[in-house]
Image (cartoon, helix red, strand yellow):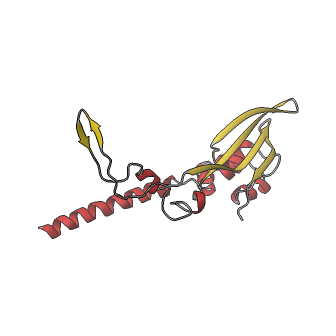
């Protein structure tokens, strides 16, 4: 009985894991996915632009549709003005993990700056009665279980004027 319950739980967990993994994998948008879902946009491009888009690259003068096929949807869009002409800038963001501050997750000495999980005793009179507790009054479990924040970093930027690329930048990985 116990063995069959464990197998049932394991089977259910395995099925759930496979379903979640399939959802994550299918939700990843790639250049090839965008081209296969919108072949009409791809076919309207010149042969040179088709080759660039297939490699995930763009060039000055390229249309917004071609950039969308190559790079996907931006996380931010900014409207502006450049030399008297209205522009639209697309910003693509990558989330990076912040480095540990002060040499590590628990500071330069390996333990937090508090007293640690030591033992303390405080006697306070409240309405004539004593009150005491054991433990560190400054212990903060969120400090000791440091989870580094994700920092948004723009890694691709493209600016359009009249629907055509006038400038672009991308951060190269070291």
Residue at figure coordinates x 44%, y 51% from the top left: 142
Residue 95: x and y in percent read 59, 52
Residue 53: x and y in percent read 71, 55
Q: How many marks?
A: 0
Which quadrant does the C terminus fall into?
Answer: bottom right
User: Seen in the image, is 27 located left or right of residue 53?
Assistant: left
Residue farthest to the bottom, as pictured? 3
Residue at figure coordinates x 16%, y 70% from the top left: 3
User: Seen in the image, is 9 located left or right of residue 54?
Assistant: left
Question: Quarter of the image holding residue 6?
Answer: bottom left
Residue farthest to the right, as pictured? 83
User: Seen in the image, is 23 located left or right of residue 67?
Assistant: left
Question: Quarter of the image holding residue 8?
Answer: bottom left
Residue farthest to the left, as pictured? 1
Which quadrant does the N terminus fall into?
Answer: bottom left
Query: Which of 50 and 132 lies nearest the eye of the viewer?
Result: 132
User: Seen in the image, is 169 located left or right of residue 93?
Assistant: right
Residue 116: x and y in percent read 42, 58
Residue at figure coordinates x 28%, y 38% from the top left: 125
Query: Which of 70 and 130 lies nearest the eye of the viewer?
Result: 130
Residue at figure coordinates x 61%, y 57% from the top left: 32
**Vertical arrangement, residue 46 with respect to residue 84, above or below:** below
User: Do we see residue 172 in this rendering?
Assistant: yes
User: Do we see residue 44 in this rendering?
Assistant: no
Residue 78: x and y in percent read 71, 35
């Amino acid at each position: 009985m116990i063995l069959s319950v464990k197998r049932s739980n394991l089977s259910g967990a395995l099925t759930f894991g496979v379903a979640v993994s399939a959802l994550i994998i299918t939700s990843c948008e790639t250049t090839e996915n965008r081209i296969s879902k919108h072949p009409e946009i791809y076919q309207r491009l010149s042969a040179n632009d088709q080759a660039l888009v297939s490699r995930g690259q763009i060039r000055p003068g390229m249309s917004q549709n071609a950039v969308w096929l190559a790079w996907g949807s931006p996380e931010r869009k900014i409207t502006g003005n450049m030399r008297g002409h209205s522009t639209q800038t697309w910003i693509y963001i990558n989330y990076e993990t912040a480095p540990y501050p002060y040499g590590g997750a628990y500071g330069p000495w390996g333990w937090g700056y508090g007293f640690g999980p030591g033992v303390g005793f405080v006697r306070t009179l409240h309405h004539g009665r004593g009150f005491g507790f054991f433990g560190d009054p400054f212990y903060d479990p969120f400090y000791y279980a440091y989870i580094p924040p994700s920092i948004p970093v723009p890694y691709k930027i493209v600016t359009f004027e009249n629907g055509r690329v006038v400038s672009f930048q991308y951060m190269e990985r070291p």
